[in-house]
Image (spheres, grey):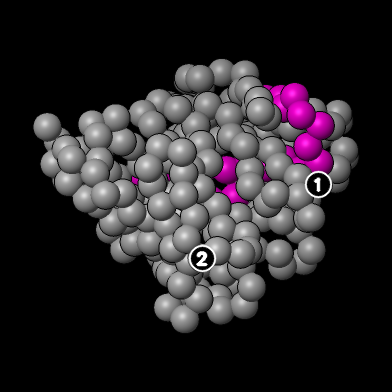
Amino acid sequence: AQSVTQLDSQVPVFEEAPVELRCNYSSSVSVYLFWYVQYPNQGLQLLLKYLSGSTLVESINGFEAEFNKSQTSFHLRKPSVHISDTAEYFCAVSDRAGGYNKLIFGAGTRLAVHP
Amino acid sequence: DVKVTQSSRYLVKRTGEKVFLECVQDMDHENMFWYRQDPGLGLRLIYFSYDVKMKEKGDIPEGYSVSREKKERFSLILESASTNQTSMYLCAAGQPPPGGYEQYFGPGTRLTVT
């Protein structure tokens, strides 16, 4: 079965600093990968996804993630964070076992941006 | 955009009560999902449905049941609530392959069982 490991439960960072949130998944077979963001007291919103093609994918608010098949990783990066990026971030991988389209989520990384 | 709504943002129930959590989506998506979210554990799948009246167990179905009588509505039922079911419950909707694979989430229901 698929599994997702987010290596950091919390990441504190100062405003305008770069950040990397790490994600590794278990399977080396063809997968689809996602990053979701959850702002306080809200549901999850899709931040970006990798389905195929370019291994570098970007979001509209400056985040990017790179699919690395050999390292089974999908790390999320932003060169300069804002206070408004404070949220919990979840990495997810598709699981098509049994013919159903399910997502397996990591435990989440809480990003805290300080002024 | 897909909109997923959940009937309550906050709910407080007593041990042993029967609890209904309702979820409605407005984009005609085939698949619907119920998760619970607990600190340090991420999201865990309780049940999902790929069609009306069809359901599949997820990773933690014990103590829960579901109902999908209409395509847009997916209900989670706690037959006899217990304190260990205190959690955040998230509903999601999505398309099956070859759809986009992503899921769209509701705002969540924070359930407290006392």
Q: Is B16 situated left or right of B71 in this image?
A: left
Point out residue B86 in the picture as x, y percentages from the top left corner. Answer: 45, 35
Dividing the picture into quarters, in which one does residue A1 lie? bottom right
Q: Quadrant of the C terminus of chain A?
A: top left
Residue at 60 percent across and 55 percent down: it is: A103
What amino acid is labelled 1 in the image? Tyr
| Residue at 37% over, 42% down | A62
Where is residue A41 shown, x and y percent of the image? 40, 26
Disc 2 on helix, strand or loop?
Answer: loop
Horizontal side of residue B17 vs A20, given as left or right? right
Residue lying at 47% horizontally and 60% vertically, measured from the top left? A56
**Does B11 sit above or below residue B37?**
above
Residue receiving disc 2: A55
- The chain ID associated with circle 2 is A
Any mark on residue A50, and which?
none
Q: Nearer the viewer, mark 2 or mark 1?
A: 2
